Image (spheres, helix red, strand yellow):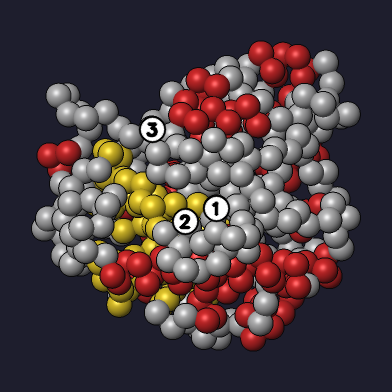
Amino acid sequence: MTTPRTRSRLAVPSLLAIIALTVTVAVVNVSNDATATENGVAARARARFSASLPAPTGPYPIGTVAWELPGAGRPDPWRPGRDRDLTLQLWYPADGSGAPGVGRPAPAPWAHPNVARHAAQRYGFAPESLVDLRGHATEAAPVRADGGALPVLVFSPGDGGNRTDNTALTEELASHGYLVVAIDHLGDALEGSTPDGQLVARTKPELPEDIRPEELGGPAVVTQVDVRVADVRAVLDALRRIGTADRGAPAGLPGRIDLGRVGVFGHSLGGATAAGAMFVDDRIRAGANLDGLVAGPVATEGLGRPFLVLRQPRHTTRIDPSWRTFLPALRGWHRLVTIAGSGHYSFADLGLWTRQAGVDLRTTEETYRFNFGTGDNRRATELARQLLVAFFDVHLRDRPVPPLLAGPAAGNPELTFG
């Protein structure tokens, strides 16, 4: 078993770090952080906690399964001499008989114990805090039989991120009737793994610590995004070919995948992946970027199909050169929505647990605010989930634009538009 490399710093939120965080992983293991104070001792003691995920709000119980996608001759730039294998996590509306409850299977774990244990160590959490965490989906439950064809949403996590890092979002979308496919970009992910939990080392070249904002649109970042875009396209190709003999595919999925209704979304570098994939693949009808930059031709040429951008307040065009050209070049239906009080990791599960884990006591206030915001991250997660469901319902299911997406409203004072 190979072990991914780790980092032991939280990025300091200067203007450079703010934009650089969209392409680097900010890690919460700050026991050696020079800014840590005596509060760090108490915070580390609090790192033994019970993590949880908000329950999905959709009408359907959900299932989940890990699925291996062999590279089939596609060279892997991060692991020379190997095919570009991927691991996917599928969430989907499930047969109600397989829903968790009395006498029924327990919900699936948030991640394989090997993955959860390694992530907990990297974050400075007690191992059981993540190893014991469960979501709300039933492992390998059969697909709901009476729901018709399933629209598809492909998800790309942040740089170094794993396929279950944003489970609060992916479970929510599945509970509303979507087939959600999250990608472990192996060689990129810090806790990437095979379906059976064998860790795969991060071998992708690191960007320079002192990279300048104007360099974020340069060849190094564009190459990283291009690899991920090719992964998204490979996933769509594989879904088109899926059959009853595919190992790991849940019962009832073949013949139920609607590739005429495909969306893509991603967090941080995954947001750049979503935009890049839409630019080169007409199969994708709608996309969303969660607090990420944009790289490659799409950054200047924009998109003519629906695109949603969610951001934290500190991610602005002033410090992200890619947004200066990309946002004005969006020609289809689009929204830029700011969630007040949010931080970069308010769009990932990590943001839900940081105060429980004492992370706010182990970092400088400035660093914490950029990464995790100043508000309630459970509320930020709730709003992000509502916005994503509403957006994809409009553009993949032809539903009317709801008030939530129409503009500011008294019921959601945390949201600003434009």
Residue 16 placement (x, y as % from top left)? 84, 56
According to the image, label 3 marks what residue? 109
**Quarter of the C terminus within the rendering:** bottom right
Task: Check the image and report above or below for 50 versus 193.
Answer: above
Please rate how many residues cluster around mark 1, counting C-alpha atoms within 10 Å: few if below 14, some from 14 to 19, many from 20: many
N-terminal-most mark, 1 or 3: 3
Q: CA distance from mark 2 to mark 3?
A: 20 Å
According to the image, label 1 marks what residue? 186
Evaluate if marks 1 and 2 touch, with contact meaning CB atoms under 8 Å apart: yes
Task: Check the image and report above or below for 72 versus 12.
Answer: below
**Looking at the image, which is closer to me, 241 or 119?**
241
Q: Which amino acid lies under the numbered mark 1 shown in the image of this protein?
A: Leu
Please rate how many residues cluster around mark 2, counting C-alpha atoms within 10 Å: few if below 14, some from 14 to 19, many from 20: many
Residue 311 placement (x, y as % from top left)? 62, 58
According to the image, label 2 marks what residue? 86
Task: Check the image and report above or below for 13 versus 402.
Answer: above
Q: Is residue 307 rendered to the left or right of residue 159?
A: left
